[in-house]
Amino acid sequence: MKVISISNIKGGVAKTTTAATLAAGLNKRGYKVLMIDSDPQMNLTMCFTQEPEEGTPSLYTLYDKGAKIDDIKVEIRDGLDLVLGDFELCSADMEFFKKAGSLKLLSKAIKSLGAAYDFIILDTPPNLGFLSLNAFMISDCIVTPMAADSFSLRAVRLLKRTLEEVAEEAEKDIPVAGILLTRYTDRTNVAKLLEESVESAAELLHTDIFNSRIRQATVVQESQIVKMDLFEYAPKAPVTKDYEAFIDELLERI
Ligand SMILES: Nc1ncnc2c1ncn2[C@@H]1O[C@H](COP(=O)(O)OP(=O)(O)O)[C@@H](O)[C@H]1O
Ligand SMILES: [Mg+2]
């Protein structure tokens, strides 16, 4: 089982889109995949389902009551399950950091899964609090999406420092498998300027940039509105091919 967190402290860089598309793409290739929506904004959840009723078992239930993943996950389709996100997780830092072994709560929860899944894909919030730290603790690697309009080297430095701290706590390396350029348009100067900065970011994170760049395309938002993944909604679209190529590359790297 491989566990992959999609992380960047910046919002709007396609973390959630990448988590959803990666999970759906791996599932389409025959892998058993569990998605965990670790962002209180619940955008990953909303990519696949209607807004859950208040009180529906979610990641919050896992952290709050120690619920088992098997008891709270929902099946999206054969071989693709989801632990729902929850707005209640907005207060996770205040509520759960004080719990004993707070950084290992998710780690404990996935132990009982055994070999049920080939991949766990975690969407994370744009901060490095309780939810991201628990996600990193169980991760074999991180994928960091970056977009031209919201690049920050300071955010990258902070991510690097946090990964090093968590790695010490977890007593294992948590490598960044690569930086994924998203919402990409090569016509703009912004993209060219960005590329240099991203090279330095990659160096800092001891990784490199995926060859595949995810182009900006309206079908992405459309597919999310109708709650379909890109492979169902626009199987022939260039942006879907971009994600296919990214998944090929990622599978080669890990
Ligand atoms: N390749 C793309 N082309 C066009 N729009 C995109 C693309 N990727 C993401 N988006 C849109 O950009 C917005 C932010 O993406 P999202 O995945 O939610 O980012 P994050 O999780 O990092 O905040 C969403 O409205 C999403 O539909
Ligand atoms: Mg998101």
Image: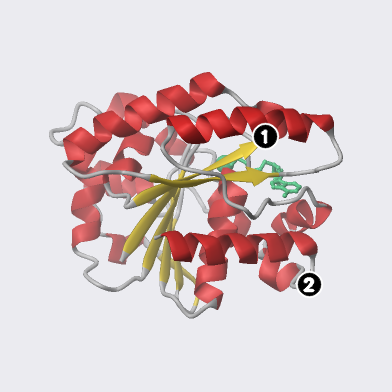
Quadrant in which the C terminus is drawn:
bottom left
Query: Where residue 236 is drawn, which disc sits there?
Result: 2
| Crowding at mark 1 (Cα within 10 Å: few <14, some 14-19, many 20+) | some
The residue nearer to you, when weighing 168 against 207, is 207
Q: Is residue 168 above or below residue 85?
A: above
The residue nearer to you, when weighing 125 against 244, is 244
Look at label 1 and name its amino acid.
Glu
Q: Which residue sits at x=80%, y=57%?
A: 219
Numbered disc 2: secondary structure: loop
Q: Which residue sits at x=19%, y=34%?
A: 168
Choose the circle earlier in sequence order: 2 or 1.
1
Which residue lies under the disc numbered 1?
195
Q: CA distance from mark 2 to mark 1?
A: 27 Å
For ligand 1, the image quadrant comes to: top right
Q: Is residue 59 left or right of residue 173?
A: right
Q: Is residue 98 above or below residue 115?
A: above
The residue nearer to you, when weighing 244 against 57, is 244
Q: Is residue 162 above or below residue 31?
A: above
Q: Residue furthest right?
A: 187
Q: Which residue sits at x=73%, y=28%?
A: 193
Q: Quadrant of residue 20?
A: bottom right
Numbered disc 1: secondary structure: helix
Image location of residue 172, percent across then percent down: 20, 45
Q: Is residue 64 left or right of residue 234?
A: left
Quadrant in which the N terminus is drawn:
bottom left
Total count of labels: 2
| Crowding at mark 2 (Cα within 10 Å: few <14, some 14-19, many 20+) | few
* Residue 141 appears in the rendering: yes
Q: Quadrant of residue 33?
A: bottom left
Look at label 2 and name its amino acid.
Lys
Image location of residue 230, percent across then percent down: 69, 64
